[in-house]
Image (cartoon, rainbow, N blue to C red):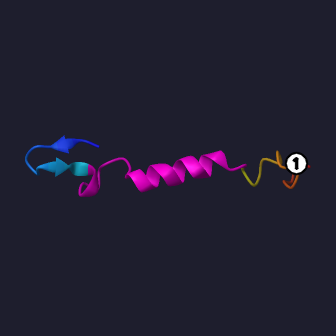
């Protein structure tokens, strides 16, 4: 998050151009940690 002295707070909560919020980062990390449904690495994918 980038602190904006003009706003007196971090821009991420209000600036739509900000990359991600804390919640989005957590969701992205959680999604990345899950086995991909098409990878077949869990034995249930199409490559089995």
Which residue is at a point 84% across and 54% down the rendered structure image? 45
Tell me which segment is drawn in magenta.
Answer: 12-35
Left or right: 8 as drawn, with respect to 30:
left
Which residue is at a point 52% across and 54% down the rendered structure image? 27
Residue 15 location, quadrant: bottom left
Left or right: 41 as drawn, with respect to 22:
right
Total labels: the figure holds 1
Queried whether the magenta region covers residue 41, the answer comes back as no
Choose between 14 and 22: the one closer to the eye: 22
The residue furthest right is 48
Pinpoint residue 39: horizontal percent, then vertical percent. Answer: 78, 47
Report crowding for label 1: few under 14, some 14 to 19, many 20 or more residues within 10 A (C-alpha): few
Quadrant of the rendering where the N terminus is positioned: top left
Q: Which residue is mark 1?
A: 47
SS of the residue under disc 1: loop
Left or right: 22 as drawn, with respect to 34:
left
Queried whether the magenta region covers residue 25, the answer comes back as yes
Which residue is at a point 68% across and 50% down the rendered structure image? 34
Q: Is residue 33 above or below residue 24?
A: above
Pinpoint residue 41: horizontal percent, then vertical percent. Answer: 82, 45
Pinpoint residue 42: horizontal percent, then vertical percent. Answer: 83, 49
Pinpoint residue 37: horizontal percent, then vertical percent. Answer: 75, 55
């Amino acid at each position: 998050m980038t602190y904006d002295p003009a706003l007196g707070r971090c821009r991420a909560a209000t600036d739509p151009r900000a990359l991600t919020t804390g919640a989005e980062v957590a969701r992205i990390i959680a999604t990345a940690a899950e086995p991909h449904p098409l990878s077949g690495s869990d034995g249930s994918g199409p490559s089995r």
